[in-house]
Image (cartoon, helix red, strand yellow):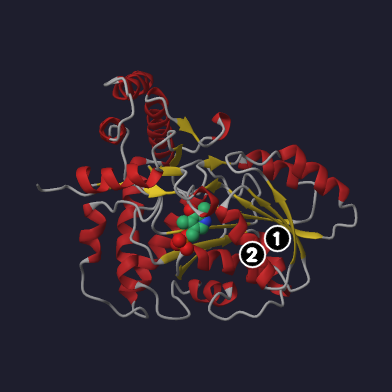
Amino acid sequence: MLKKPCLMIPGPTNVPDRVLQAMHRPLINHRGPEYEAMFQRISLALGRVFQTNQPVLVYPSAGTGMMEAAIVNVLSPGDKVLAVSIGVFGDRLAEIATRFGMIVEKIDVPWGHMADPQVLASRLAADNQHEIKAVLITHNETSTGVTNNLQALAAVCSGHPALLIVDAVSSLGAVELKMDEWQLDVVFTGAQKALMLPPGLGFLALSKKAWQAQAVSTSPKYYWDAVLLKKALAKWQNPYTPAVSLLYGLAESLTIIEEEGLAAIFRRHELIGQAIRAGVEALGLRLFAEQAAASNTVTAVVAPKGIEAKKIQKYMREVQGITLAGGQKQLENKIFRIGHLGYVVPTDGLLIIAALEMTLMALGMACPQGKGVTAVQDVLLQGIAAT
Ligand SMILES: *Cc1c(COP(=O)(O)O)cnc(C)c1O
């Protein structure tokens, strides 16, 4: 039987047809006027999505490249950094800093929970010599489905000179993030999450304070050197060959984002997040994330007793054509994750929850039929009535 592929993983995400079409174009000279006009438009639009007046640099890169770029641009070997980790990606950022010679102190938050701003505040307050040069934070921890209260975490950093480095790969463009207003110093994301593009582009922005740190950072770098990109950007160019075809797509995805508007985008993600969580719980499953911190871009679900997470994923993939993500590291086969960011709409929740319910029934779980879908419908009806 024909299967209509349905990709519900937290990256790569679904790419709108308009974006795919936009990329299907002959290449142009990346040092010519047509390119410069396009890159100017892109750069200005990116600033609005990052909510910053600083330049947003565009790299041909995976998100992990941006993690490395963030570290090597503003830090130096021997610098002390405080890594607040709430999962796999927080650990990765800490590991990158360690490999580049920084002295990393970690605050390890139990997985499934968000970081406590008070804990960060007291650690920073104890650092009266100002030895800590940077605080590393993951805005939305994709591995656990937890969103940190970034604004509150940023607020407690404001009394300390440390730079605040934020991994916003699975949040920026889906969840509110005000780079300038919240005084975030380094913010980065990738193409294949909320920005609705194929993988292969990374985005990095530095605050004024971060640019000052960049100027004195001694970490070796060339490809990641933000100054090279900033200088080229003054002429709407790049220091080396950009991913031109992906930039065609980016120009289109930014147009789609501006047409909808950030407020509506955040609301849409709130609604689908709420709908999926309501559906999952109505099916009798447990969310991995603590309630107050549950992410609106990815939902981590604890596999029910007696049914392996991988069995659920396999059934959904093979029988229903729906691809979900598994658990990472120690969560492997214990949870599965539903990605709902980027090109998704709240009614996608109906399909996912209905299909999940059928899967659980097929795998032998006693599931009150229709309860999950009803819960999703209730959230959607209330959401529509409220707008
Ligand atoms: C996806 C992701 C990354 C890594 O991006 P890649 O493109 O896979 O390298 C980093 N941080 C977070 C929070 C992510 O969700």
Give the residue drawn at x 32%, y 52%: 255
Q: Amino acid at mark 2?
A: Glu
Front in this rendered view, residue 366 or 173: 366
Label 2 neighbour load within 10 Å: few <14, some 14-19, many 20+: some
Per the image, the residue denoted by label 1 is 209
For ligand 1, tell me if the residue under mark 2 lies within 8 Å: no
> Residue at the right extreme?
129
Residue 375 x %, y % = 35, 21
Q: Amino acid at mark 1?
A: Lys
Mark closer to the chain start, 2 or 1: 2
* Residue 89, numbered label: none
Residue 25 x %, y % = 21, 69
Looking at the figure, which quarter contains the C terminus?
top left
Front in this rendered view, residue 277 or 366: 366
Where disc 1 sits, the SS reads helix
Front in this rendered view, residue 53 or 80: 80
Q: Which mark is nearer the camera, 2 or 1?
A: 2
The answer to whether any part of residue 38 appears in the image is yes
Give the residue drawn at x 68%, y 77%: 219
Give the residue drawn at x 57%, y 59%: 54
Q: What is the quadrant of residue 36 in the picture? A: bottom left
Residue 108, compared with residue 212, is above or below; it is: above
The answer to whether any part of residue 47 appears in the image is no
Residue 31 x %, y % = 37, 80
Residue 27, compared with residue 3, is above or below; it is: below
Per the image, the residue denoted by label 2 is 95
Distance between mark 2 and mark 1 Cα atoms? 24 Å
